[in-house]
Image (cartoon, helix red, strand yellow):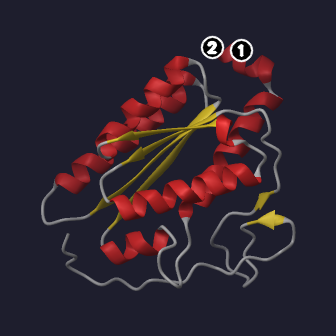
Amino acid sequence: LKSQTTPLLLPAPAMASTGNVGAPKDGSIRGLEIPAMDGKGLRIGLVAARWNPSVCEALLDGCKESLKACGLSDADIIVERVAGCYEVPFGCQTLLASGTVDGVIGMGCLIKGETMHFEYICEAVTQGMMRLNLDFQKPVVYGILTVLTEQQALARAGLTADGHNHGKDWGMTVVESCLLKKKYPAAARAAA
């Protein structure tokens, strides 16, 4: 895919070793401070697009790494693949409807091309993922990179020297969201 512009890429903030994953140590307000979490016993579904494979594989690896850091075993991480980002919401819906997962992460990479296709797919996928959050009342993490250039995609998949693998963040986010839901089981039942 051809890129039309070369945007300024800012390096990801350095991470402090304060016990919190993702805590910026350079004083930046960017990023996410996530405390260490125990996700043992959770079952998480990962739905990854096959389109833009090097980026999607790196994101998937980052997700699995952070889930394991939270105490999930390989048996508690279900990985399914779909053709592209447009199919990701359906893959997530299938796992959620099975009742075998506590939460899902839908991941893929959309890179802007020369037509409106990018905008249409971005909007459809975003709406589909949000709908799953509300309809299933289980954590659904939006792990879709929407970038303007291949270089941006590589950086956000941690495939460049100054990049950061956002898949790691998504893994931590789904565990945090699942633990929040478990903390308030009566509220979750009342909403159903």
- Give the residue at x 83% y 55%: 36
- Is 60 situated above or below 58? above
- Give the residue at x 61% y 27%: 101
Which image quadrant: the N terminus? bottom left
Residue furthest to the front? 75
- The alpha-carbon separation of the residues under discs 2 and 1 comes to 5 Å
- Give the residue at x 41% y 63%: 55
Asked which quadrant contains residue 73, the reply is top right
Q: Which of the two residues, 49 or 170, is positioned nearer the viewer here?
A: 49
Which image quadrant: the C terminus? top right
- Give the residue at x 70% y 43%: 175
Q: Is residue 96 left or right of residue 34?
A: left
Q: Is residue 20 left or right of residue 47?
A: right
What amino acid type should be assigned to the residue bearing mark 1? Answer: Arg
Q: Position of residue 127 (x, y in %)?
A: 38, 38
Asked which quadrant contains residue 15, the reply is bottom right
Q: Which mark is residue 69?
A: none
Q: Is there a contact, CB below 8 Å, between mark 2 and mark 1?
A: yes
Q: Position of residue 180 (x, y in %)?
A: 76, 36
- List the residue tagged with mark 1: 189
Q: Which of the two residues, 19 or 118, is positioned nearer the viewer here?
A: 19
Q: Which of the two residues, 61 or 95, is positioned nearer the viewer here?
A: 61
Q: Is residue 5 left or right of residue 133?
A: left
- List the residue tagged with mark 2: 192
Neighbour tally class for label 1: few under 14, some 14-19, many 20 plus, Cα within 10 Å: few
Q: Is residue 54 left or right of residue 143?
A: left
What amino acid type should be assigned to the residue bearing mark 2? Answer: Ala
